[in-house]
Amino acid sequence: MEDVQARVAWLREEIRKHDYQYYVLDQPLISDAEYDRLVRELLELERQHPELVTPDSPTRRVGGEPLPGFRQVRHRVPLLSLDNAFSEAEIRDFHRRVSERVEGEVSYVTELKMDGVSVALVYENGVLVSGATRGDGAVGEDVTANVRTIRSLPLRLRQELPRLEVRGEVYLAKEVFARLNQEREERGERTFANPRNAAAGSLRQLDPRVTAGRSLAVVLYDVLYAEGVTLATQQEVLEFLARVGLPVEPHYRFCPGVEEVLAFCREWQQRRHELAYDIDGVVIKLDSLPARELLGSTVKSPRWAIAYKFPAEEKVTRLLTVEANVGRTGVITPTAILEPVTLAGTVVSRASLHNFDLAREKDIRVGDLVVVHKAGDIIPEVVGPLTESRTGNESELVPPERCPVCGSQVVRFSGEVALRCDNINCPARLVESLVFFASRDAMDIEGLGPALAAQLVEKGMVRNVADLYYLSAEQLAELPRMGKKSAANLVRALEKSKARPLHRLLHALGIRHVGLKSARLLAAHFPDIDLFPGLSREQLTALPEVGEKMAESVMAFFAEPRNLETIERLKAAGVNTREPVAGGVQTGPLAGKVFVLTGTLASMTRAEAGALIESLGGKTSSSVSRRTDYVVAGTDPGSKLQVARELGVTVLGEEEFLRLTGRAGS
Ligand code: IVH
């Protein structure tokens, strides 16, 4: 007996922990099937020992608690949950229970069980007025603003009914889920375990704009309340929903008896992978609504319906090794290399481990037998190891200290789980870095798009962004699909881009967390790139808008020798690395002074000299007039020098200019 008590306590603790992982963190540590096993064992023990049941046992609760932050709404009709069946025998048991209470032939409607989030919607006079999550079944969260962003959901019905309350499921298509997760992985954010968690996370966003970007979808399957409408069967319910313009999952079927129900379950267990969205089973519903009244419900679920859950598609295979892969944005993710197994219709030999923390939390070791499944029916994942079959020859995972592609020191920013390669020239990142470098808000290099960037990297002509400035028109003209003219144009565009102000360059370098706006702010305070390697956390965070994260990534960027080398090569190519002071500013040693440049300077390009003048508060002009304060004359000056002499404007040689700008001797 004591054993039972201990087991019950352990199961409850375990289930609570997994509930938290699942509902709050959206990061389950075990598969649904394993979770179901725990709940079933607890239910069974509680059935055998009713004296052990406590009101706070996880079995007494229907769903997740509403999150703070959303207004709570009490459902007019409680949103019940469903009992589960895991085998044909359990479906037959359900049918037997129903048949005992209902006279005559018992027919059903079978529907695909969408793996999403349950919602209740209210339409008043045909207009959508409310959307709420199920919450604990009695009280949910008001997510009206978010529900309104779902494209497939009409904001107005085709038929103007005084009041209609419906229930359905909000979900994410598999492809959308895969894309969302890929983006999150690239940004070093936690990925969603499955489309349902992704849908829940998206629906419970406090900012509806985020929800809108997630491409949620919805289907409706139940009428909770309909003023002025009489419906007699589930078929009529679904037809009615479709008639008023609401989306309905189209594969439902009328089944005159239990054999047809079983056939439907078998069929979709096979065919589930054909669908664009994830389903986790079949919902079997008594067709006749009056007969449902007769059967009634328990506190938790109706007696007239049951959810047949497909067996989880899991396989056991051997983890051969773990590869560290570098993504386009530098995020390093561990990938499990597996002994190939067939899983949910395809052969799987690689599976994501997401990040090293998670892999360690799950205690996955090389050589382990591991359980694999497909998240959202598409993304192979390692669920966990079978620890009991270890031989002792397994080895723990070691996160790489150096980037496996370029050898740079791996960095990890606080608050992030991802490890990163922060070298912008890492070949794994280079194509994307180049395209970004050349983009409109960055260095604005016309004609340098993804196709050309890929060619340059592939041919080994460009190994870092600075190499761009060392390309000749002749070299470029040799590339396929690149004529002499476009080569010359590109060289011209590159030349033009050299004069961009520092903030564009900072942005172009792709320093994490430094967007165009922050780049402007940084460059305004530190107007020369040479100031950056020496900046301390305090100096950076002293600026408004610069938080810990940005400070950290700026420091990491300028601590990487490869990045500094790139900057030196950019400078050597004549790329400007200074910031003109905004609006020809009133402060700075050269405030209000107008300069004209003529001839060639030995120490810097014209563009650089211009940027330097502007960074100190001065202005440049292309022609000499009485308003000109200084003409800076290099070697081979043009007629401007002549004009200056005639007008009595001060002429500076290069040395004098450098002294005036504080660069002498540099
Ligand atoms: S009927 C009282 N029909 O599955 C009626 N539920 O495991 C209860 N679900 O909470 C729901 N597709 O979120 C029903 N076609 C469908 C469904 C469906 C998905 C979800 C729903 C429910 C859960 C029960």
Image (cartoon, grey):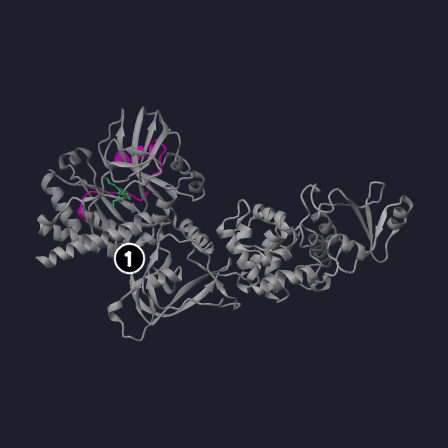
Residue 150 pos. (x, y %): 40, 38
Report the residue at 40% width, 43% height from top: 216
Q: Which residue is mark 1?
A: 30
Quadrant containing the N terminus in the rendered view: bottom left
Q: Does residue 512 appear in the picture of this structure? A: no
Q: Does residue 94 appear in the picture of this structure? A: yes
Is residue 378 left or right of 107 when viewed as pictured? right
Q: Is residue 300 magenta?
A: no
Q: What element does badge 1 sit on? A: loop
Report the residue at 26% width, 53% height from top: 17
Residue 55 pos. (x, y %): 16, 44
Residue 284 pos. (x, y %): 22, 44
Looking at the rendering, the stretch of residues picked out in magenta corresponds to 235-258
Quadrant containing the C terminus in the rendered view: bottom right
Is residue 530 left or right of 556 when viewed as pictured? right
Is residue 21 left or right of 502 when viewed as pictured? left
Of 499 and 656, nearer the camera is: 656
| Residue type at numbered disc 1 | Ile
